[in-house]
Image (cartoon, rainbow, N blue to C red):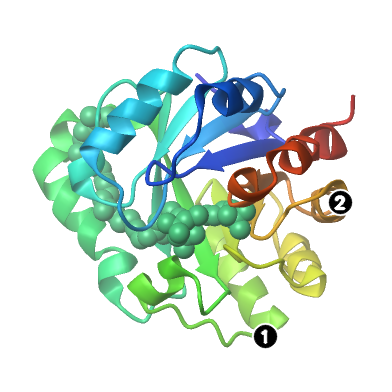
């Protein structure tokens, strides 16, 4: 079983965005701890299967982050199920999950699934808009969600999501202080070594996504910035 506790850096690839074989090889052999396949819109079973098969040529662990039921397919090493703790709509907190578990709970191999408590803080990102997230939060509000994730719900991961924009370090620090056992994933706007190491000082795992599609060479360097040589 893959030990997420040992991860420090992951790349998130969007099945809805094109990536060449050459770029994918560099990403998969970069020394990152895992590849997460996930995105909010335009994710289809076809593009998930295609990306999974291409990442599968390499030994790096490959995880599907589930954003819709239709795109779940066997073949990944692990499955992440997000719950958006600061959503205003219960559908994105427990609603879709309850429906899925009602249908598939008995046949699920629960060891393959891990659960991410999201707190989405960039109001303009697609995930915030889709899930009607309440992004107007103080650092104390965010830390309270983190404490809920750990103490109320015993979630293994709290995911501070700034997708598309670089986050507020003061919020990340406050959230980290609120957590003892639950891992802190930070994602959003990390595009260079300085930002990666700044976030890695507080987050357990730094997630790098969009910058791979903007400046891949700089994005690849975030691996050593987080993990060292
Ligand atoms: C292995 C196998 C075959 C199992 C079969 C059994 C089975 C079907 C089990 C299902 C189990 C289950 C409980 C599933 C959950 C179903 C579900 C749809 C839950 C909702 C998930 C959710 C809250 C989605 C909201 C969007 C979200 C948070 C997505 C995560 C990814 C993310 C944040 C991407 C970044 O998005 P963004 O940057 O804003 O946008 P783009 O990158 O796309 O531009
Ligand atoms: O795409 P970026 O902004 O790097 O964010 C990474 C990840 O947290 C997105 O879900
Ligand atoms: Mg994205």
> Residue 107, can we see it?
yes
Q: Quadrant of residue 217?
A: top right
* Marker disc for residue 138: 1
Residue 133 percent location from the top left of the image:
44, 78
Q: Is residue 61 above or below residue 90?
A: above
Disc 2 to disc 1, C-alpha distance: 21 Å
* Near-viewer residue (138 or 39): 39
Q: Residue at x 72, y 42 (%)?
A: 219
Q: Is residue 34 above or below residue 102?
A: above
Secondary structure type for disc 1: loop
Q: Position of residue 152 (x, y in %)?
A: 49, 63
The quadrant in which the C terminus is found is: top right
Q: Relative to 199, is 178 on the left or the right?
A: left
First reached walking from the N terminus: tag 2 or tag 1 = 1
Q: Residue furthest left?
A: 103
Say if 64 sits above or below 163 in the image: above
Q: Which residue is mark 2?
A: 201
């Amino acid at each position: 079983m893959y030990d997420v506790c040992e991860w420090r850096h992951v790349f998130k690839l969007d099945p809805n965005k094109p990536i060449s074989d050459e770029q994918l090889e560099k990403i998969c052999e970069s020394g990152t701890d895992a590849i997460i396949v996930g995105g909010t819109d335009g994710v289809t079973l076809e593009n998930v299967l295609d990306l999974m098969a291409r990442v599968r040529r390499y030994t790096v662990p490959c995880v599907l982050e589930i954003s819709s039921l239709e795109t779940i397919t066997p073949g990944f090493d692990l499955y992440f199920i997000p719950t958006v703790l600061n959503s205003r709509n219960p559908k994105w907190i427990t609603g879709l999950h309850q429906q899925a578990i009602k249908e598939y709970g008995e046949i699920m191999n629960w060891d393959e699934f891990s659960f991410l408590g999201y707190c989405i803080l960039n109001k303009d990102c697609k995930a915030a808009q889709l899930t009607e997230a309440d992004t107007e939060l103080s650092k104390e509000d965010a830390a309270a969600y983190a404490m809920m994730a750990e103490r109320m719900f015993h979630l293994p991961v709290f995911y501070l999501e700034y997708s598309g924009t670089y986050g507020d370090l003061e919020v990340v620090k406050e959230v980290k202080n609120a957590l003892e056992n639950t891992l802190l994933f930070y994602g959003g706007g990390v595009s260079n070594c300085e930002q990666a190491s700044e976030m890695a000082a507080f987050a357990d795992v730094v997630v790098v996504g969009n910058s791979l599609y903007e400046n891949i060479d700089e994005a690849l360097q975030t691996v050593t910035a987080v993990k060292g040589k």
